[in-house]
């Protein structure tokens, strides 16, 4: 029972302290790797959640919860993930509905974009360093990733292609 409470508290905390989605991956990594899952399980979970349809954050929560506590763990982690945004969005929508004509609200939302982008770059760099590929192969992967971002190729196709190339090239 304490493991389920710890899972719930962890996902509640992650979703209260981050903007969820891709931006929460860094915080989720630091809160769950070593406590509930291994580094390789986390990388697998991120890959699966990017390929599968639906919310990445909820799929990550269910994967980690299931790995830590089976079906009850998956359900508790999912509840901890969806509860904060659901409650907060009701409050924010009510507030924004009243302030929708204020210019500072639009500027605030625009100001979040670069902060989230930098957070994602730092998270990618951490995973890149822990993966051990900082040689020429790692730099090729980084360069290809930049090209993929420049052409705005869908993430699901990229992860699927990377998995197929991994099977074919990295035997």
Image (spheres, rainbow, N blue to C red):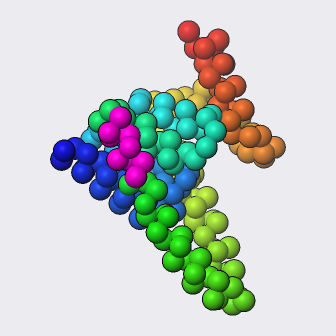
Foreground pick, 2 / 16: 2
Q: Residue at x 68, y 35 (%)?
A: 156
For the N terminus, give its image quadrant. Answer: top left
Foreground pick, 169 / 109: 109
* Region rendered in magenta: 71-79
Q: Report if residue 66 lies within the magenta region.
A: no
- Can residue 104 be seen here? The reply is no
Q: Residue at x 65, y 83 (%)?
A: 97
Q: Report if residue 73 lies within the magenta region.
A: yes
On screen, residue 64 above or below 40: below
Name the spot of residue 51 as percent of width and height, x first.
Answer: 62, 34
The residue sitting at the top extreme is 171
For the C terminus, give its image quadrant. Answer: top right
The residue sitting at the right extreme is 151
Residue 140 sits in which quadrant?
top right
Name the spot of residue 158 as percent of width and height, x first.
Answer: 69, 33
The residue sitting at the left extreme is 2
Residue 144 sits in which quadrant?
top right
Foreground pick, 6 / 162: 6
Foreground pick, 18 / 124: 18
Name the spot of residue 169 as percent of width and height, x first.
Answer: 63, 13
Q: Residue at x 73, y 45 (%)?
A: 149
- Locate residue 168 relative to residue 74 in the image: left or right: right
The number of callouts visible is 0
Q: Main secondary structure of the magenta part?
A: helix
- Can residue 91 be seen here? The reply is yes
Q: Residue at x 38, y 54 (%)?
A: 80
- Locate residue 168 relative to residue 22 in the image: left or right: right
Name the spot of residue 31 as percent of width and height, x first.
Answer: 34, 49
């Amino acid at each position: 029972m304490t493991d389920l409470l710890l899972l719930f508290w962890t996902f509640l905390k992650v979703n209260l302290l981050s903007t969820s989605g891709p931006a929460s991956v860094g915080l989720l990594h630091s809160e769950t790797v070593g406590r509930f899952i291994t580094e390789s399980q986390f990388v697998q979970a991120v890959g699966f959640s990017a390929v599968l349809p639906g919310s990445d954050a909820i799929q990550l929560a269910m994967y980690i919860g299931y790995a830590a506590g089976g079906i009850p763990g998956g359900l508790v982690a999912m509840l901890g993930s969806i509860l904060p945004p659901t409650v907060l969005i009701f409050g924010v929508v009510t507030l924004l509905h009243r302030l929708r004509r204020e210019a500072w609200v639009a500027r605030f939302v625009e100001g979040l974009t670069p902060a989230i982008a930098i957070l994602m770059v730092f998270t990618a760099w951490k995973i890149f360093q822990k993966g051990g590929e900082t040689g020429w192969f790692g730099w090729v992967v980084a360069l290809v990733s930049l090209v993929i971002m420049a052409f705005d190729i869908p993430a699901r196709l990229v992860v699927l292609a990377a998995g197929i190339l991994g099977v074919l090239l990295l035997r």
